[in-house]
Amino acid sequence: MAEQNFKDMIAASPRIFVLGVAGDSGSGKTTFTMALRAIFGADLVTRITLDDYHKYDREERAALGITALHPDANRLAELMEDIVTLRKGGLIKKPVYDHATGSFRTPVPFKAGKILILEGLHTLYTPEIRSLLNFSVFVEPDTDVKHEWKIRRDVDERGYRREDVLREIAEREPDYRAYIAPQLTYADAVIRIRYSKYGRDIGISRNVYQVSVSQVQLMGRETDNIDLAIDLHAILSLAERDFSLEFIHGLKEGRNMGDLIIDGEPGSHVVRSLETSIERQTRVHPITVFSHRDYVTATELAQLVLCWRIIHCRISHEICRGEASPNVQADKKIKVDLPNTVSQDKK
């Protein structure tokens, strides 16, 4: 009898797994769930942007002198009620905010897939909303990186004028510090993005940045199996681009955190190792999100690391509730084939 793969298992499960992704506007929240959506597909993964739950349109916010980052400018109580309904498998009338016009469109029927992603400014803001999440992520680019991204997105994709975007950035900063940034302390994983140590210009030209994936470490518990085996032959004889991997453990915001720091452009052999690990644990084949390329960016490798962590959390929930197939097991043995610092610098 063929072993059941994890994709089929969650499709048959009555449970809705809710992933919360918080961070500032333009911080890259959508980017870091791309691998998860690619692996499981639109039939299982649905997404809600919390911008749809703004209370006021753009003109009303301007007249009131309030930014979208202020909690009072959002319908968080309605959001919580809708999440409760969706977790039960119910149907909601979801509001729709149109960024092109800054106004609301007609609400649409919405039903959650087996994995529901919530992305927005206030995803971790209230204890009530946090209690409804199965796993949470906070995305935090450095200020200069975030501002560069926001300008490019809002001007190129949303049609805003550059001067309006710059003015909005300045107006929003106090509310970001007061209401958005503190949510970082509640996240299960934190993604930080900085310009690469190999040069700021490759961030702009090739989307290459330094990315760290910080994960809360629960002391005293066995953790899961990440296979990041390094092929030294490929590094020494084949790779022609700079990259580095580093792991740092420390106390941050009062919590034990482990940081995997990725910089530059690793070769496809590093990505394939991680994709193989995901395949082995989920029995979903093939997983080839990025391994068809010779090189990937640190951002793309970080997507897979985060995706693997979320999948393992989902598997663990099934096992804890006795819903998992006996053929789908989460590895219990720690196996990180990665020294404290592995770097490759070829110019």
Image (spheres, rainbow, N blue to C red):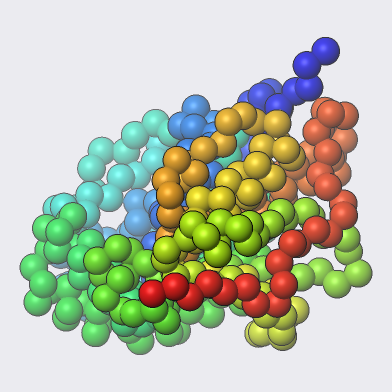
- Residue at x 53% of width, y 72% of height: 344
In the image, farthest residue toward the front: 237
Vertical order, 156 against 180 (above or below) = above
- Residue 277 position by quadrant: top right
Q: Residue 58 vs residue 243: left or right?
A: left
Q: How many marks?
A: 0
Whether residue 291 is visible, yes or no, is yes
On screen, residue 113 above or below 128? above
Horizontal side, residue 253 vs residue 95: left or right: right
Q: Residue at x 87, y 51 (%)?
A: 332
Q: Residue at the location (52% across, 60% down)? A: 237
Is 196 rendered above or below residue 85?
below
Residue 204 % position (x, y): 26, 70
Q: Position of residue 93 (x, y in %)?
A: 40, 36
| Image quarter in which the C terminus is found | bottom left
In the figure, is residue 6 to the left or right of 18? Answer: right
Of the pair 246 and 281, the residue shown nearer to us: 246
Query: Viewer-proximal residue, 52 or 296?
Result: 296
Q: Residue at x 87, y 35 (%)?
A: 322
Q: Position of residue 81 (x, y in %)?
A: 54, 48
- Tell me: residue 321, above or below residue 239: above
State the image coordinates of residue 298 (x, y, percent, origin top left).
47, 64
